[in-house]
Amino acid sequence: MSSKTKALAFCIIFLNTWLYAQPGLSDTIELDEVVVTGSKVEVARKNVPLTVSVITQEEIEQSGESALLPVISQQVPGLFVTERGVTGFGVSNGAAGQINIRGLGGNPTTQVLILIDGHPQFMGMMGHHLPDAYVSSDAEKVEVIRGPASILYGSNAFGGVINIITKKQKHDGITLNAKALYGSYDTRKLSLSAGYRKKNLSVFASVNHDQTDGHRDSSDFAITNGYVKTAYKINEHISAVADFSVAAFESKDPGIDTASAAGYSIDIMRGKAALSIENRYNSLEGALKLYYNFGEHDISDGWHSNDAMNGIMFYQGIKVLEKITLTAGYDFMEYGGKGSPITTVLRDENGVIIPGPGGRPQFQTSELNNKWVSIQNHAFYLNYQHQLFPNLTLNAGIRLEENSSYDEELIPQAGLAWNATPFTTFKSSLSKGYRPPSIRELFLFPPANDALEPERMMNYEISWIQQWHNKKIRTELTTYLCEGDNRIIMVPPVAPPPPIYKNTGNFKNMGVEFAGMAKLTKNLRFHANYSYIHMDTPLAGTPEHNLFAAATYNLKKLSFNMSLQQIANLYTSIGGETVIFEKYYAVAGAKINYKATRNINLFVIADNLLNQKYYINYGYPMPGINFSAGISVNMNKDF
C-alpha cells in the first residue's frame, strides 16, 4: 500500500469515527490559549499573526517520553527531529537531534532557536542546541513558532523558535511526582520532582536519570540532570524568578552500520542559570532577564572545549490606548569559548587548497588554539499591535540587530489576524529571517570559512484556523513560502578533502501544514497533523511528507493511546551531497495506563509495533519493536 493510500485511509477512518461519535460530543477545544513566544507579552493565540503551535502538559505526559524533542517532533507539523536509537542523541560525528522546521535547520541546528522560559539555549562555540539537555518532566508546555522570529529573538531564530516553559507550583502546598521505567536494551529512566508554594514563595525542583545499553554495540548512553526554580511575588505587580540546571551525560557513537569500528565517545557537562524580574499592571507588562549558559565537552578524538553564553533581555509592553499595545525591547548576548589545538588546511578565497613543496597541502594551527574567542550581539526592537476593528488585529515591528562581526541589519515583520467569527480565524504574515554565521562556521575545524556572509530570508504565510461542531473540533491549515539567499551549507571539496562551508546563493521552500484535534466523546480524543514541503535545495533530515496521528481512549481506570507516524522521501546527506534516503516508513506505538489508586499509575509502552526497518540518520538503523513498563506516583498536599 502506498504512502498516499495509507494517508487517505487514515483520513477516512477519522471522518467515519467523527460522524459516528457526533451525538456524544461534549468537550470544547479552546482557540484562545495564551502564548508569550510570539509577542513576548501574553497575547491570545488567535491574535498572534505568526503560526504558533502549543503542546500541553497533558500531551507531553501522554507520550511517555523522557526526552522532550521526540514529543515536539510528533506534535508539530512541519517540524522534524532526527533520532538514532532508543534514547540519547549525542554530539559530534554520528549525532542525532537535528531540528528542521520547514526545511530550515542549519549545520547542524543553527537556524532553529531553543528557549527555556524565554532564555536562549545553544553552545557558545558551535552555535547549536544540545538535544539531550531538554527533559519532559520539567515542561509545563511548549510553544513553537513555525517560521522566522528574528524580530523578537535575533540570532538562530532564522527558521523558528521552540520555547520550553517550565513548571511552577500553582497552589499552596506540596506536590511530589516520581516515575520509574524499565525497558528493552536495559533501558532505565528515573525522575523525581517536587513543588512547594506558601503565600508568595514557590519552588520547583527535579532530578532525572536515563540510561541504556542501546540496541547496537557501542551505543551506550547515560544522563543525569537536575533543575531548580524559585519564584517570589514581591507585591501584586512585581515578581522575581531564578532558576539553575545542570546536566552531565556520556554517549557512545556506534558508527554507521557498514563501518568496521565504532565512532567517538563523548563526556559532556552543561549548565544554565537565569534571573528574571517581571512586572504586570493593567496597562504594563514586561521583564528584565539575565541568563548564563556554560559547558565543558570531552570527545575521544582528543577534542576538549569550554564554552559560555550570557546575556540581558529587557522588554516592556504598554497599552497606549485601549486598542493599541507597544512593546519595546533591548537584547545583549555574548557567546564563545576555547578548544583544543585545531589544524586546518590552507585554502585560497575560492576554497581551493594551496599547495606546498612537492604539491602537498599546507597546514596551519588555528589562531584559536586554546584561546577564548567570542562574538557579541546587540539589538533594539519595537512591536506595534493595533486592534483596528473588534475582530481585526494588526501586528507590525522592526528590529535593529548589530553583530560584532558584521554590519547592522534591519529586520521587519508584519501580519494580520482576523477573527471572522467566534469559530473562524484567518492569519497572514510576512517576516524576515536573519542569522550571522556561528564561531564554528567562521573559524573552527576544516570546513570553516571566515569569508561567510549572514543568511537572510523572507517568509510569507497564510493560515486558516477553524473550530467545528460548537468548538469540539479544531483544525488549522497553513501554507507558506520561504525565499532567501546566502544559505550556509557544507559543500563537497573542489580539491582533496576536507569540504568547506559556503554561501550557496538563493533558495526557496514552500509547503502546506495541517493540524487537527477533536474530542469525539467524553472519553475519546484524536489528534493528527500532516506537512508537505517542496525544497529547491533539500536539507538533510527533512521529510517531504510527514503524517502523524494519535488517539486516546479512557475507560474507567484504563487509558489507551495509539499513534502512527508515516514518513515519505526523507532527505539525508551522503558524501556531502543531499539525496532522498528513505522513500517510506511507518512507525506505530501504543501506551496503556492503569490508575491503580488515586496517586499511583502503572503503564506499558510499545514502540515500533510494525517492527519496521528504517533509518533516520544515514547508516544508523533504528531499533525494531521494543517495550517498556513503569510506575508513576503523584501526591499533593494542600495547606
Image (tube, rainbow, N blue to C red):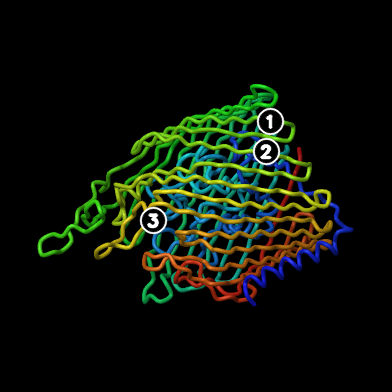
x then y, percent, for residue 396: 58, 33
> Which residue was labeled with disc 3?
489
Task: Give x and y (percent) for residue 210.
Answer: 55, 60
In which quarter of the view is residue 404 placed?
top left
For discs 2 and 1, the disc positioned in front in the rendered view: 1
Q: Are marks 2 and 1 in contact (CB under 8 Å)?
A: yes
Residue picked out by circle 2? 47
Question: What residue is shown with label 1?
Answer: 387
The quadrant of the rendering that contains the N terminus is bottom right
Outermost residue toward the left in this view: 357
In the drawing, does residue 33 fall left or right of residue 360? right
Q: Residue shown at 42%/33% (left/top)?
A: 378
Q: Quadrant of residue 31?
A: top right
Please name the amino acid that badge 3 sits on. Answer: Ile
Query: Relative to 188, is 503 on the left or the right?
Result: left
Report the amino acid beneath label 1: Gln
The residue lying toward the viewer, choosing from 579 and 222, is 579
Question: How far is mark 3 from mark 2, CA to CA?
Answer: 36 Å
